[in-house]
Amino acid sequence: MGFSLLGLIMALAVLAPNLLLVWFPPLSPMPEARVPRPLGWLERAGQALCLVVPPITEPGELVGWWAVPALAALAGYYALWARYLATGRAGETLYRRWWVLPVPMAVLPVVVFLSTAAWLGNLWIAAAALVLAAGHIPASLIIARRVQPARGRTVPR
């Protein structure tokens, strides 16, 4: 246990764009999607762990080149938030495919945290990221499948 400024910065960097939903909520209503309760709990636990664990665990030996994929994934995540705003805050945009990723706004934060774990030499962050992946990605896939039929087409690229 200890404090990690880099861990705090990365955790806040992933959390920050989510605050856009407070000021710029989706304008189109999202269809109801039933995410199994245990999966929802796992998702919330992963989100909480990824916010708390990086700042409260000291880094190990830094592996500087891992900052590159961490920051690239973060930049991609920010670009997807920009896409959400640019599409007129369409809710389905939050679950829209990008390149080969079916739910990139769920996958990229996991990539950021796994890369950050490697960068900071911290297995606790990796464990938190795996919990996030186990809950957030499947839950997002369930919602994405529900969003697709609502628009009468597959998730656009």
Image: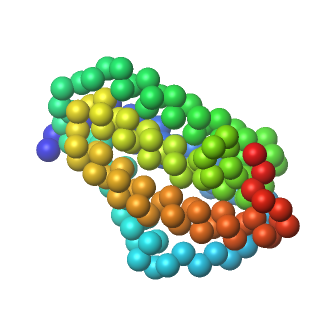
What residue appears at the point 31 percent right and 29 percent down from the top-left corner? 119
The location of residue 46, given as percent across then percent down, is 38, 59
Spot the residue most to the left: 1
Is residue 5 positioned above or below 65 on the image?
below
Q: Which colour assignment does the render follow? A: rainbow
Quadrant in which the N terminus appears: top left
- At a point 44% along the width and 41% down the height, the residue shown is 111
Q: Nearer the viewer, residue 125 or 55?
A: 125
Quadrant of the rendered image containing residue 91: bottom right
Task: Give how far across and how far down residue 134 sits, in percent.
Answer: 41, 61
> Would residue 56 be visible to someone looking at this image?
no
| Residue occupying the point 35% across, 53% down | 130
Q: Residue at x 44, y 63 (%)?
A: 135
Instruction: Give the x, y percent position of residue 2.
Output: 16, 40
In this rendering, the count of numbered labels is 0
| Above or below 67: residue 146 | below
Please indicate, yes or no, whether residue 4 appears anywhere in the rendered image: yes
Where, by quadrant of the figure, is residue 22 drawn?
bottom right
Viewer-closest of 149 and 72:
149
Query: In the image as oriented, which residue stretches furthest toward the front?
Result: 100
35 on left or right of 59? right
x, y percentage for residue 115? 37, 35
Q: Is residue 107 left or right of residue 66?
A: right
Q: In this view, does 14 lie to the left or right of 129?
A: right
